[in-house]
Image: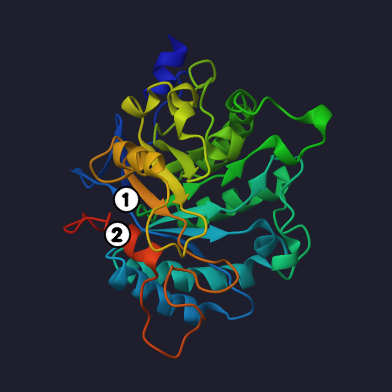
Amino acid sequence: MLASAAATGLLATGRPARAAAPGLRRAGAGLRWQGRPVHLYGPNFNAFTGDLGPAPHVAEIATIAGLWGANCVRLLVAPAEYRERSPEAFWAHLLPILDACERQRLFVILNWWCIGWPGGASQDIDHWFRFTNYNDSSIPLWTRFWQDAATRLGDRGAIAFSLFDEPTAHYNPPETRFDRLDQWYHVQPLYQDVIETIRATGATNLLSLSGGHWAKDFSRWRERPIDDPAGNFLASFHMFADGEWADFDRLVGGLDQEIPFLCGGWGYLPTDLAEPPDAGFTRWLETHAFPDGSFVGHCPWAHAIWSDPSALATGWPRPEPATLTAFGRYARAHIPDGLVRP
């Protein structure tokens, strides 16, 4: 009974629900914005590229809104970018980008861009970036960021919080790994602590929760559902053309009919192919992630993190007008017109 109440967004602890601020709200297996059903479509976007500062990122937000026809951007913030700056310097970079999204009428999914296990090992991508331990999976750092973000952004209801990009125990030492399709059971208690930290600030922003095993595993959700005092969350499911879409039913078990699911990251590898190479993956996208599917939207992994952040012409910042790559054109074709916007 408790699991059923929590899984449907009701309170399982007897705590009084907080008054909902205007913003993105869960409604059963869907989302609403100011009472209207809404789907979220738009690319992932790296909020920190080298030492460029916020100005070119702000300009690129207008490009995303224009070329993509998007109503959303999934904004990536890597742990080391927050760790290595003072809070003042960090927010001085990020807030102008968030303000640009607001001007362009884009929803934002602010994403803690960490691949690894909370409090455990993480993916080593230091050779791409300036800072060591770029995917810092420290739980105190993670918690401090979300408390800071919730305090600063809790009155901005068009901004959702994606708590952890891709929890996976793959990088842990063998003796501390979890079964690859049984990781939700282990990550849920870690999420729960961070959710309570966020809600203690009074913020009711929509929360995006990635499953275990590279954001795929929700196989034991019903045993350990989320207890969110605000009842305002969605599930973020990631899938790539080299992924495991054949295991979707086992990984999700029909939950996409009960709670909102977003395809928070998808793509073909490499992303410069002239046409999709895998018909099976394309059918999965059409069934679940694309506009006629069961999900509430999709966010293509449409940028090279070392160069161009939106599947546009290579080289960024660029002197010439931007154009979509072949992958960008394919993804753009599956973003409908007439979207609800903030």
- Residue in view at x 29 percent, y 59 percent: 71
Query: Could you say where residue 119 lies in the image, as x and y percent from the top left?
Result: 74, 40
Q: Is residue 210 left or right of residue 51?
A: left
Q: Residues within 10 Å of mark 2 (few under 14, many from 20)?
A: many
Query: Could you say where residue 175 lies in the image, as x and y percent from the top left?
Result: 83, 27
* Most distant residue in the top direction: 1
- Give the Cα distance between marks 1 and 2: 6 Å
- Residue in view at x 62 percent, y 59 percent: 78
Q: Nearer the viewer, residue 266 or 14?
A: 266
Query: Could you say where residue 338 lies in the image, as x and y percent from the top left?
Result: 16, 58
Would you name the residue on which mark 2 appears?
71
Q: Nearer the viewer, residue 213 or 197?
A: 213
- Residue in view at x 46 percent, y 29 percent: 246
Query: Could you say where residue 304 lies in the image, as x and y percent from the top left?
Result: 54, 66
Counting residues from the N terminus, which is met first, the one under dot 1 or under dot 2?
1
Q: Secondary structure at mark 2?
A: loop
- What quarter of the picture does the C terminus occupy? bottom left
Asked if the residue under mark 2 is in contact with the one under mark 1, i.e. CB atoms within 8 Å, the reply is yes
Q: Is residue 83 above or below residue 316?
A: above
Q: Which mark is residue 40?
A: 1
